[in-house]
Image (cartoon, rainbow, N blue to C red):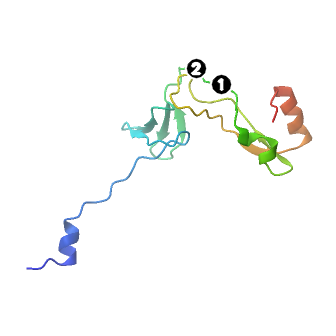
Amino acid sequence: MTDTTRDREKRLPEAEFDNPTCGVCFSETNDNGDTYICHSCGITYSHITLEASIADPDKPACNKPCTSEWHTHRYVNPGYRWKCYPCALTADHATNECHGGCHIILNTPNTNALAAETGDPR
């Protein structure tokens, strides 16, 4: 007796979803039942929205300044600049990556004054 295509398909396993990757270090997160967690970065991600949270908010912040060479003026279109922030991860994060949430902003006299005021050389 020859199996039909449908008979063969019934014996195949269903696909499995992978856990999402961490937005900072890009390693696979673990599902702890309530959230996805990246142990290297100390970040949890909501099962529903994937919004990031600090896994242990009682731990102090890393706060290292941004040192990305990509965030210098030569890597941005004229009229724009990077707005950099200190690392938002906990001080004991295991990943070598820091993440402050830096983003590109319009370079105006007000942002130049703010950069001078905060000591941001970018």
Horizontal side of 82 relative to 35 (left or right) equals right
Q: Where does label 1 land, which residue?
A: 63
Horizontally, residue 114 falls left or right of residue 75, namely: right
Q: Find numbered disc 1 in the image and state the secondary structure of the residue it sits on.
A: loop
Give me the disc on residue 9.
none
**Relative vertical location of residue 119 with respect to residue 34 in this rendering, above or below:** above
Between residue 95 and residue 79, name the one nearer to us: 95
Q: Please state which amino acid type lies under the numbered disc 2.
A: Pro
User: Which quarter of the picture shows residue 73?
Assistant: top right
Q: Amino acid at mark 1?
A: Asn
Residue 75's x, y, as percent?
77, 47
Which quadrant of the rendered structure holds the C terminus?
A: top right
**Above or below: residue 105 compared with residue 41:** below
Q: Which residue is mark 2?
A: 60
For label 1, the crowd category at 10 Å Cα-Cα, with few meaning under 14, some 14 to 19 and many 20 or more, is: some
Q: Position of residue 24 (x, y in %)?
A: 56, 39
* Name of the residue lying farthest toward the left: 1
The quarter of the picture where the N terminus appears is bottom left
Nearer the camera: disc 1 or disc 2 = 1
Mark 1 → mark 2, Cα distance in angstroms: 9 Å
Taking the spot 51% from the left edge, 32% from the top edge, the residue there is 41
Q: Are marks 1 and 2 in contact (CB under 8 Å)?
A: yes
Q: Residue at x 53, y 24 (%)?
A: 57
Q: Residue at horizontal 19%, vertical 65%?
A: 11
Which of the pair 52/92 is nearer the observer? Answer: 92
* Residue 117 as seen in the image, left or right of residue 101: right
